[in-house]
Each structure stands twice: as C-alpha cells, then as structure tokens.
C-alpha cells in the first residue's frame, strides 16, 4: 500500500518502484556516510601509530648516543689510569680477579644485548596500538642500561685501585 495510509489505494508498479528506489537511495546515502567515517578513523589510527613509532625510534637513538659516549669516556679513562708496563708486571697477581670481572662484564653485556633486542622488538609491536605501558618498558630498559654502566664504571675504578694497592704493599 502507498505510504499515505489510505486503505482504498493499492500499490502499483510505479508507486512500488518509486518507494523501492527511494529506500535504496536512502540506504546508499547512509552507507556512504558510514564508509567516509570509517576512512577518517583509519587515517587517524595510522597517523597515531606512525607518531608512536617515530617517538620510540628517537628515544632509542638518544639512549644509544649516551651509552656510546659513556663507553668512549671509559675507554679514555682506562688508557690514562693503567699503563701497559704496570699491567704486565702485576698480571699474574690479578689474573683471577680480572677473569672474574671479564666474565661478569661479558655476561652483563650479553644479558643486556638480549634484553635490549627483546625490548626493541616489543616496542615496535606495541607502537601500532599506542599502548600506555610503553613508558614503563622504556624505563625498565634504561634501568638495565644504568646498572650495566654503573658496573662498568665501578670495574674501571676498582682495577686501578687494586693494582695500586698491590704495588704499594
């Protein structure tokens, strides 16, 4: 029946076609609006993910720069504090201590490398969803790096002190 509600009128082919066409056009318009909104949401999500990845990459690069600078400083200090001739004359006395330090340092470096590789992978996986927990993971990685740097600094300080004490017995 036509939409005007009169009981005496019946659907005709023409009125039925007009009604179906109008309903089809209304549905098409609603679908177009929904698709446009979905496209906007996808663009916004991709933009947010790209920003998160960029921020993670910048933060990682800054940490690497700091660690490399500290390593260069430690290398320079090691060359200044300990002369080759002094090391050769006392190497038999401190060989066991140095072996332990090397083992501990190597183990710490390997552990840090494994942890760091795992953390980088985790950061890239989570960057797509912009998880709030990313800052906690970055802090954990920085704490691990800080502990390693502290251990290396302590080792570079203790070796010359031990050698000095042995020399001046």
Image (tube, rainbow, N blue to C red):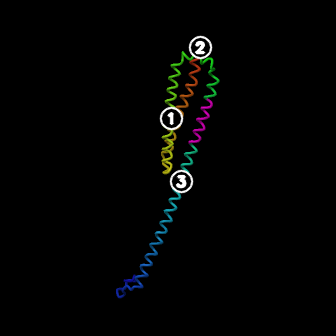
The x and y percentages for residue 127 are 51, 48
Residue at 61 percent across and 17 percent down: it is 86
Circle nearer the N terminus (1, 2): 1
User: Residue 66's image quarter?
Assistant: top right
Q: Which residue is mark 3?
A: 48
Label 1 crowd (10 A; few <14 / some 14-19 / many >=20):
some
* Dominant secondary-structure state across the stretch colored magenta: helix
> Residue 153 lies in magenta, yes or no?
no
The kind of secondary structure element at disc 1 is: helix
Contact between labelled residues 3 and 1, with CB atoms less than 8 Å apart: no
Q: Which residue is mark 1?
A: 112
Q: Tell me the quadrant of the picture where the N terminus can be found.
A: bottom left
Label 3 crowd (10 A; few <14 / some 14-19 / many >=20):
some
The x and y percentages for residue 169 are 57, 11
The kind of secondary structure element at disc 2 is: helix
Q: Is residue 139 above or below residue 45?
A: above
Q: Is residue 154 above or below residue 119?
A: above
Contact between labelled residues 2 and 1, with CB atoms less than 8 Å apart: no
Q: How many marks?
A: 3
| 105 lies left or right of 6 | right
Q: Which residue is mark 2?
A: 167
The answer for how far apart the CA atoms under marks 1 and 3 are is 30 Å
Circle nearer the N terminus (1, 3): 3
The kind of secondary structure element at disc 3 is: helix
Bounds of the magenta segment: 60-73
Farthest left residue? 7
The answer for how far apart the CA atoms under marks 2 and 3 are is 61 Å
Contact between labelled residues 3 and 2, with CB atoms less than 8 Å apart: no
Farthest top residue? 169
């Amino acid at each position: 029946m036509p939409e005007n509600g009169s009981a005496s009128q019946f659907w005709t082919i023409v009125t039925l076609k007009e009604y179906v066409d109008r309903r089809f056009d209304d549905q098409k318009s609603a679908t177009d609006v929904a698709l446009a909104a979905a496209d906007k949401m996808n663009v916004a999500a991709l933009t947010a993910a790209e920003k998160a990845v960029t921020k993670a990459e910048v933060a990682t690069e800054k940490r690497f720069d700091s660690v490399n600078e500290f390593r260069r400083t430690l290398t320079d200090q090691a060359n200044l504090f300990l002369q080759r001739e002094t090391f050769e004359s006392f190497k038999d006395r401190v060989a066991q201590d140095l072996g332990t330090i090397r083992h501990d340092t190597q183990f710490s470096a390997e552990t840090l490398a494994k942890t760091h590789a795992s953390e980088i992978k985790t950061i890239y996986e989570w960057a797509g969803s912009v998880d709030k927990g990313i800052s906690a993971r970055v802090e954990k990685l920085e704490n691990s790096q800080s502990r390693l740097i502290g251990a290396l600094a302590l080792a570079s300080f203790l070796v010359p002190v031990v050698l000095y004490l042995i020399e001046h017995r």
